[in-house]
Amino acid sequence: MTGPAEHDHDPAPHFAESLDYVTVRIGEQLLGLPIERVRDVFIADRITVVPGAPADIVGLLNLRGRIVTAICLRNRLGCALTEACAKGCAELTAIGLDHRGEAYGLIVDAVAEVVRLDRSTLEPLPVNLDPTWAALAAGVHRLPDSLLVVLDLDAVLDLDLRAAA
């Protein structure tokens, strides 16, 4: 017969107390993407520009036989575009994500590292955070040298395509 004390060494509760993120940079800002949502990290090349597409959409690309919509995270966050992102140039760093059955490539300035942070350190958004950022963020973690803004990927990927049409 097993007693409750025998389950105290189960490593699973430790993972329930942590949050894992793929970190990316837009300019100097560090952003966290929930790791369970990230499918790929890749260099986007041969992007096909889509005439009349919303400004957030860089274009379409082929990733291992899948048509992927490339979205510029800089633009979504209201930041000034880099020349490469504005022109849809080749060699853009992208994070592959799925959302509502569609494939997306989130174009970022750089991919940093994967981090595991304690769930208890996730804080609500600061009241003075830019409204555009606040609409796309889920919280923040204070790190020793910076602030990690955790993105709400559902909000980031919910483009109002019908209104744009």
Image (cartoon, helix red, strand yellow):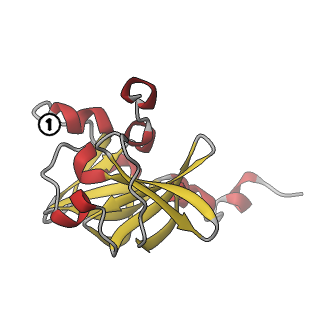
Q: Residue at x 15, y 60 (%)?
A: 146
Label 1 sits on a secondary structure element that is loop
Residue 154 image-quadrant placement = top left
Instruction: Name the quadrant of the C terminus.
Output: top left
Is residue 73 toward the left or the right of residue 18 in the image? left
- On the image, the x and y values in percent for residue 87 come to 24, 61
Q: Find disc 1 in the rendering and name its residue.
A: 129
What residue is shown at x 17% (from left), y 55% (from top)? 81
Residue displayed at 31% across by 38% down: 136
Q: How many residues crowd mark 1 within 10 Å: few (<14), some (14–19), many (20+)?
A: few
Left or right, 42 with respect to 64, comes to left
- Vertically, is 161 above or below 47? above
Residue 101 lies, in percent from the top left, at: 63, 44
x and y percent of residue 157 in the render?
43, 42
Residue lying farthest right?
Answer: 1
Residue 88 located left or right of residue 4? left
Could you tell me the amino acid type at mark 1?
A: Leu
Instruction: Determine which quarter of the picture holds residue 15.
Output: bottom right
* Residue sitting farthest toward the front: 51
